[in-house]
Structures are given as C-alpha cells and as structure tokens.
C-alpha cells in the first residue's frame, strides 16, 4: 500500500497532518508544535537530526529545516564556509548553512505549493529523506575540513558518491 492511498478521498489535506502520519509510520519522535508546525528527531548514522517542518499559508510553502550540533573552532570558520560552498554546488534539493550563534549546521528547503497544490505523502517523505541523506553524505567532509585539517578538495572526495539507505 502506498503512503498516499489513505488520503485519496480527502478533500483538503494539511501537509503537517501528512508529516505527523509519516513520523508515526517511521516511529520518529515528534511534537506537533502547532497546527502549522511539527518538530521531530530522526536518527542517522552520524548524528541525530532535529527536523522541523512548517506550513506557511501566506506564501504557500512547506519549509523544512534540519539541524545538528556542530561546533567548529573559530579559526576554522573560513574553511567551513569553503566546504559549505562546495557542498551546496552538489545539492539540488536544498542547501546547507551554518548558524554560528546557535552552533548548528542547517539544511533548508522550501517546497512551494502555490495555487492550491497539495504535496503527497511520498513527496513529503522524499523531502525528509533527502535532508537526512544530504547530512549523512556530507558530514564526513565537514569533519575532515574542520577537525582533520584537510583541504575542501580532499574532503569532498569522501562525499563524492551519494549515501544510500533509509531515513
């Protein structure tokens, strides 16, 4: 049975309701923060990822933010930004950034659903999975640059192949 079969007869589907259902299916810890927002944790190979999805009816966008703690030394921030640029050049479904004040590595993506479009469960599941796969793929490169004193070029060789698995 596909993830979307149970939603076929529903006239209007709220995307956060779908996310909550997916979290239950995958047995992820989650907290429904409000009608338009959900926060959950997803265990990866390298880290545990805090993932928040929020629906904005104003601009009809489903926003995903996935974070994990990352505390590079101040003297390695320039190298971190260099590897982030190289990483984002290889990402098509979102982008990494570093929030220095919060000491968090962040993956962001916005799914625009303008004109009353509806995101299906498979699409939202893929969105969440893509965030985790990207973090798992590039985490070793971030580590090598920041703490292994490796060049961006060398570190990116580790992330050259996409990681396969399930979030």
Image: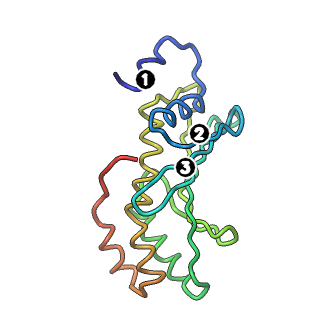
- Mark 1–mark 2 Cα distance, whole angstroms, equals 18 Å
Closer to the camera, 93 or 27? 27
From the viewer's perspective, is 137 left or right of 29? left
Seen at 58% across and 88% down, the residue is 75
**Which of label 1 and label 2 is nearer to you?**
1
Closer to the camera, 42 or 6? 42
SS under mark 1 = loop
Q: Mark 2 or mark 1, which is nearer the start of the sequence?
A: 1
Q: Mark 2 or mark 3, which is nearer the start of the sequence?
A: 3
Task: From the image, tell me which residue sits under label 2.
Answer: 62
Seen at 49% across and 53% down, the residue is 94
Task: From the image, tell me which residue sits under label 1.
Answer: 4
Query: Which label number is shown at residue 41?
Result: 3
- Marks 2 and 3: in contact by CB < 8 Å? no
**Which of label 3 and label 2 is nearer to you?**
3
Examine the image and state in which quarter residue 90 appears.
bottom left
Query: Which label number is shown at residue 166?
Result: none
Examine the image and state in which quarter residue 115 appears.
top right
Give coordinates of residue 19: x percent, y percent.
Answer: 54, 34
Give coordinates of residue 124: x percent, y percent.
Answer: 48, 36
117 to 124, vertically: above or below: above
Q: Mark 1 or mark 3, which is nearer the start of the sequence?
A: 1
In the rendered image, the quadrant that contains the N terminus is top left
**Which of label 3 and label 1 is nearer to you?**
3
Give coordinates of residue 3: x percent, y percent.
Answer: 41, 26
Give coordinates of residue 106: x percent, y percent.
Answer: 56, 60
Neighbor class of circle 3 (other Cα within 10 Å; few <14, some 14-19, many 20+) is some
Examine the image and state in which quarter residue 66 appears.
bottom right
- Mark 3–mark 1 Cα distance, whole angstroms, equals 23 Å
Closer to the camera, 58 or 162? 162
């Amino acid at each position: 049975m596909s993830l979307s079969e149970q939603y076929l007869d529903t006239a209007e589907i709220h995307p956060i309701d779908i996310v909550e259902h997916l979290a239950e299916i995958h047995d992820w810890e989650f907290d429904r923060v409000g009608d338009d927002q959900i926060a959950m944790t997803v265990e990866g190979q390298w880290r545990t990822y805090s993932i928040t999805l929020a629906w904005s009816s104003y601009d009809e966008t489903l926003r995903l933010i996935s974070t994990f703690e990352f505390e590079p030394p101040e003297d390695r921030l320039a190298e971190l930004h260099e590897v982030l640029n190289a990483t984002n050049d290889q990402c098509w479904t979102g982008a990494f950034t570093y929030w220095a004040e919060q000491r968090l590595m962040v993956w962001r993506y916005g799914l625009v659903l303008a004109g009353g479009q509806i995101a299906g469960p498979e699409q939202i599941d893929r969105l969440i999975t893509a965030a985790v796969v990207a973090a798992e793929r590039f985490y070793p490169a971030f580590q090598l640059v920041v703490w292994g004193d490796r060049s961006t070029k060398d570190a990116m060789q580790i992330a050259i192949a996409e990681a396969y698995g399930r979030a």
